[in-house]
Amino acid sequence: GAVVSQHPSRVICKSGTSVKIECRSLDFQATTMFWYRQFPKQSLMLMATSNEGSKATYEQGVEKDKFLINHASLTLSTLTVTSAHPEDSSFYICSASQGGQFTYEQYFGPGTRLTVT
Amino acid sequence: AQSVTQPDIHITVSEGASLELRCNYSYGATPYLFWYVQSPGQGLQLLLKYFSGDTLVQGIKGFEAEFKRSQSSFNLRKPSVHWSDAAEYFCAVGAFNNDMRFGAGTRLTVKP
């Protein structure tokens, strides 16, 4: 149980275009979803936290107009990188939390490799 | 806010040897501690977690970790390393508000 999927696993886009990454909790309802960014050989950096039906809370330094997060349902959150540039190339990982007694545990997706050319 | 330090960026051990990966945390309240493993290009897999109770926690793949409050540590151990254990290991600390912070990671290389 507690499986999180991401789609696509890899995406290449041209500079100036937008790309959407989906994060789904497959067998549980995720009250909270998280988006992380990971640069090569570095740790995960939290970008934003989203609760279903609410606006996402962005970490300091993360441009909310560039990284649009939508958490429209209890099983789906999307991250849209708008007007992507090469420096946005990274590994994006989402995670989901069930809430309640499981609030402190996050289940991670397999990640999405974004390359902006 | 909480923070995590993994002092060792890279560790090399021989197959069959024992392993200890260090993790120190900073948090004012009771921490929720995790160890994750990440293979290249993959997501994170939970090895084990500590919320409360017994300070020695058993995880998957033969890993264990010990929570030591006096040392603010949560070191990961394995008595005999296998070549398939080569990966990146992340320690993380969670807070009551779902906020999870990761250490910088320790890359494990296993020599034949």
Image (tube, coloured by chain):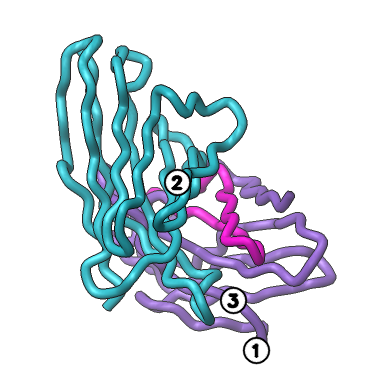
Chain colours: A cyan, B purple
* Within-10-Å neighbours for mark 1: few <14, some 14–19, many 20+: few
Horizontally, is B44 left or right of B51 in the view? left
Q: CA distance from mark 2 to mark 1?
A: 28 Å
**Vertical order, B69 against A45 (above or below):** below
Q: Which residue is mark 2?
A: B107
Question: Which residue is at 27% across, 64% downward?
Answer: A25
SS category of the residue bearing label 2: strand
Q: CA distance from mark 3 to mark 1?
A: 9 Å
| Span of residues in magenta | B89-112
Q: Chain of mark 1?
A: B
The kind of residue on which mark 1 rests is Asp
* Within-10-Å neighbours for mark 3: few <14, some 14–19, many 20+: many
The majority secondary structure of the magenta stretch comes to strand
Please tell me which of labels 2 and 1 falls first in the chain.
1
- Say if labels 2 and 1 share a chain: yes
Asked if the residue under mark 2 is in contact with the one under mark 3, i.e. CB atoms within 8 Å, the reply is no
Visible in this render: residue B10?
no
**Vertical order, B87 against B33 (above or below):** above
Q: Which mark is residue B50?
A: 3
Locate the C terminus of chain B by quadrant: bottom left
